[in-house]
Structures are given as structure tokens and as C-alpha cells.
Image (cartoon, helix red, strand yellow):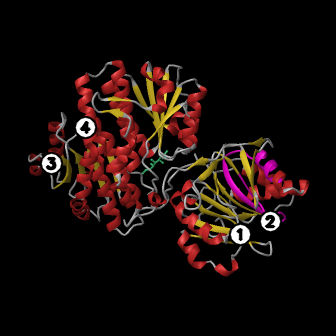
Amino acid sequence: MCGIVGYIGKKNSLPILIDGLKRLEYRGYDSAGVSIINDNNEIVSFKRAGKVLDLDNSIDKDKFEGTIGIGHTRWATHGVPNDINAHPHCDMEYLFTLVHNGIIENYKHIKEKLKEENYIFHTDTDTEVLANLINYHFKKTNDFEKAVRLALVEVEGTYGIACLCVKEPDKIIVARKGSPLMLGIGNEETIVSSDASAIINHTKNVIYLNDGEMAVLGRNGFHLKTVEDEDIFRDVEVLDFLLDEIEKGGYDHFMLKEICEQPDTIQNTYRGRINFDTGVAKLGGLENIADKLFNAKRIIITACGTAWHAALVGEYMIEHYCRIPTEVEYASEFRYRRPILNSDDVVILISQSGETADTLAALREAKKAGATTLGIVNVIGSTIAREVEAGTYIHAGPEIGVASTKAFTCQIMSLALITLMIAAEKGTISKRKLIDLAGDIKALPEKIKHMVNRKEEYKKVAEAFVDCRNFLYLGRGFNFPVALEGALKLKEISYIHAEGYPAAEMKHGPIALIDNDMPVVFIAPLDRTYDKIISNIEEVKARRGRIIAIANDDDKNITDYADHVLRVPHTKALLAGIINVIPLQFLAYYIAAARGLDVDKPRNLAKSVTVE
Ligand code: F6R
């Protein structure tokens, strides 16, 4: 949610900032801007509504030469996305220039206070208030670092900031609370960014800032401290992904690339974590809480969006195979509704980014209540990954497309491994069944590859539905969350209204919507609910709905019922979510692409939602 980049070193900063913003754009793309300290020690800024490409095309590059700079790509929280509200923002005297992620919750109160001191404001943003608050403290201290610190102590809410000061032009000051920020430590240069994608092509050596910490970046290095003015020493960590992983590699969109990567990403999730001879899974990151997990009275899984759909699959898995009562909660509800938690509960937090504000708050709530916390996270070193007691990385690699695809299947894979691990220990599953399921896991990459290779078939079906205005997705059991996820994918990127339902619920309302304009996607593998699904299909057919079925390769019967069939290989119920969602990801992708939409940057969305 909003991206920050900053550079201090010996190179011209503008190309580095623009390149960084392009890589960060998936985090937000309402508007973008840069500020640079030029050779005359003046701060020059340029910002505009729209995408980073618009900024790049319209900026006069000759006027923006300098070796220190900051940039921002915005997802609007306060104020509409226009040129004025775009970042960077300045105080009224143009001493400070600031980019900011997050929300300053008490900005109105501070604004009123500053207005009484004759401060003038030009925008609706909380960031401009922070810039003026820094100015206010600078007037008293005449010290850039102190002024930033004192201002930050006063603000409530969340921030990741990078700030320039015309009076001390050889510095960038950065700070974080609730909004990620990391330093890339290069050779005589430091790059600051809200995520690793803007750093990786300069250096793999990084330092993550924690909440309440700041860094003063100078030409000869940096120093870290808390906003309470205590010095900090932190080891440098090494990023473990390659530049290729965050580039499109010949695909039209990151989303398509990420869908097609799933044979590999699924394997990366389970590699080295399961013994295929015994079916026993072992997750090193969970060892310190293994006893608590095996003896949990209750498991609560909490997450947002797509990760919440994965959580629902997890509920079905854990109850089915481990016989532990399991509940799924929206993180945004969980944190506010005073949930009853006990010390023998295990709370699982699922998050691709590891930064989602509501999921992070739910984690903190669970820890406060004394529950054991376990994270299923993709981004290494992210806040949730660092704050949970135990966790497992899904190893999906960087997910850049705003609509989550490969992270979803890898989250389900991680949940399957946790399920097998618990079930084996508790003896709630036979040894034979364990080996069987492990065999199915091993076969997954080939099956997914088979689906990726038939993407043209899926595309053909998608092209028949490009102009539809509504869709219904129906599934039962393990496939109900898949229906929800299929609908979410479609609405996010194609802007077609779509709903997911448990198939049997259709009769209790949604059936009223069905006519020959309503495509209904049935997830109909040959499992124990197959006959029931066929009955539901007949109900829709009787009302002239258009039927798309996700069906197994060997299901010859389905063509009697469905207008279109998206074929998938067989798998056990445990892994059905992974297999059956893939044609739905392709369906959504090809419909949106055929509508000419910017699939990787759907309107109003941002990749990681670091505000409440
Ligand atoms: C949907 C999507 C979102 C995220 C949600 C949680 O395609 O990407 O619904 O799943 O914002 O994000 P994470 O997993 O980063 O916590």
C-alpha cells in the first residue's frame, strides 16, 4: 500500500528512483512523485496523478539531477488521487520534503494546533501535516534529526517515511511504525524502500527497520536509532531471491506469469518438508510450538481476502484429518470483537505480504491473550513473519500481480503440510492414507503443469464471457472456498460482479438471479458430492443459466449438463483447492485481458493493505 524509495550515494538518483517506483507500483498507483537534492542543494520535486510511466514521461530529466532523492507511488487514503495530493509533500516553508506510507490518525488535531501557530496547508493529506509538524519542531531545535524524532513521538497511527531537509542536504531520514521499510546497503550508497523489489537490483544486503525505529542516511553510511533516541545495532541480512523473479520474463502480465509458475512454487512449498515414504511432514519453523499445536483445544485461522479463502480450506482440512475444532475469522473482525482466546488455542495467521494491517493487529491481539501464534507468510522478513512465535514460509517467490494467485495455492499447500504433520502425530489418519496423500502432493507439480499447458483451452472459454456483467461461482466442501476465490479473482481484475456460494445455498436466494444472462461456474470434480452438484447444475439449467463446469478429465457425463467445461486432473479432496482454482485464475485473467484492462494494477486495489 503505497511504495517508498530513496537513494543516497554517488549515482544520479532519478533513474534509480523511477526504476524503483516502477517495481513498487503494484503497491499503489493512484499518483507518483519524486524529490531530488540538486547540485545547488535545492530540493526539486515533481509529482502527478496517474501511473509511474506518466511521471517518467513528463518529468524534465535535466532539471532533476542529483545524488540524493526520494520517491513515492500512492494508494490514496486521505484526499483524492490528484496532482496536489500526490507525494512528496512539503511544509509551508519548503524546508522539508516528505514521502509517507500509512495514516496519521491524529492529523486533524495536530493540524488545528499548527493552524493556531499560523501554519498554512495546501492539501487534504495527513502527510502535509507531518511535514509541518517537523518544521514546528525544527524551529525549536534547529536540528533535522531531532525535529523528525519529536514529530514522530507526537503522531498516532502508522508511518513509513523518508524525509529530506534543505538545511541539511546531505541526509535522508527514514522511520517506520506499522508500515514496512528496509535499507539496502550498497557500495558507497544506501537505497531505502518499502519492499525488497526496489532494492534487489542494487544490493542483496538489507537491514529491516522495526516499528519505532529510524535511520539517518548520510553520504558515509547510516546510523540506526529508536524514535526515543536510543542507538541500535542490527545485523545485515541477505535477500534470497533473484532479479528475474520480479520481472515479467516474456509474459504479458505478472499475473499470467505467476499463474504459470505454480508447478514450481507448489514444489518449493513442500520441498524438503515431507517424507514421501511415510507421508510424515516436518516443518522446521514450527518445532518450538509443535507440542502446543498437537495438543491445541482449538485452532483459529485468521487472514484477509484471498488468504482468508485459503484459511477456509485449512479449516476443512484440519477438522477433517486432525479432528481439532477449527474456526476461521476475518482478521478485521477478529481484532475488534473481543474474541475469547485461551492459552491452549493456536492462532494461525496467513498473509502473503506479511504486512496486512488487520492481520498484524489480529496477531498482536492473539499474543496479548496468551494464545500460541503461527504464521504462514510469503515475504521473508516481513513484520508478521518476525512477530509470530513460529511460522512457515510458503516460498512462492515475489508475487507482483495485485491479484493473488500463486500465494493462494502455496498457502493451501502449507496448510496441507501442517494438517499431515498434526494428523500423523495425533494418529487421526492411517499410515496408508498418509502415504497416499503424500503421493498426491508429489504428483501435484506435473498435474499443474498439465493445466498450464492447456491454458489456450481455458482462454477460449473465457473469451465467450468477456461481455458478461455478473457471474455466480458454486462449489461444495473443499471447493466452496475455491468458488469464493474464483469469484474474487474475477471481480478484482475484470470489474465484473461475481459471487461465490456453497452450491446448496443457491436455492436459498441466488437462484432468483438466474436467467440466460447469468453464467454459473460449478466446481464439479468427481468426488463424493458430485451427484449433488449435478442436481444443482440441473436446477440452473432449468432456468436457462449458462453453465461452465470445472470437471475431471475422465468425466464424460458432464458435457450433458454444462455448456462449457474446463478440464482438470483428479486429486484428493485435501488438494482439490490447489487444482481446481487454477482454471478459475486463468478464466479471470483471460476475461480481464480480453477486456483490455490493466490486469496487474486493477483500479482501487493495492497489493498489501497496510492501513485498516
Ligand atoms: C486478492 C488479494 C487480497 C489479499 C489480501 C491479504 O487477490 O490479493 O485479497 O489476499 O489483501 O493480503 P496478504 O495475504 O498480503 O495479507
Of badges 2 and 1, nearer the viewer stands 1
In the image, which is nearer the foreground, mark 3 or mark 4?
4
Decide which of 91, 215 is in the foreground and name it. Answer: 215
The disc labelled 3 sits on which kind of residue? Asp
Disc 2 residue type (three-letter) = Pro
> Of label 3 and label 4, which has the lower sequence position?
4
Query: How far across and down, in percent of the image, does residue 332 sit?
Result: 52, 39
Name the residue carrying label 1: 67
Separation of marks 2 and 1 at Cα, in angstroms: 11 Å
Q: Earlier in the sequence, mark 4 or mark 2?
A: 2
Q: Secondary structure at mark 2?
A: loop
Q: Is residue 292 left or right of residue 258?
A: right
**Where is 349 relative to 94, above or below?**
above
Q: Which mark is residue 169?
A: 2
Please give the name of the residue rendered at 38% of the width and 56% of the height, measured from the top-left corner: 258
Q: Is mark 1 within 8 Å of ligand 1?
A: no
Q: CA distance from mark 1 to mark 3?
A: 59 Å
Label 2 Cα crowd, 10 Å radius (few <14 / some 14-19 / many 20+)? some
Q: Nearer the viewer, residue 208 or 363?
A: 208
Residue 568 is one of the magenta-drawn residues = no
* Residue that label 3 marks: 553
Magenta stretch containing residue 167, yes or no? yes
Quote the CA–CA distance across marks 4 and 2: 60 Å
Q: Amino acid at mark 1?
A: Thr
In the image, residue 13 above or below residue 171? below
Residue at which label 4 appears = 440
Find numbered disc 4 in the image and state the secondary structure of the residue it sits on: helix
Observer able to see residue 477: no
Q: Which residues are magenta?
A: 147-174
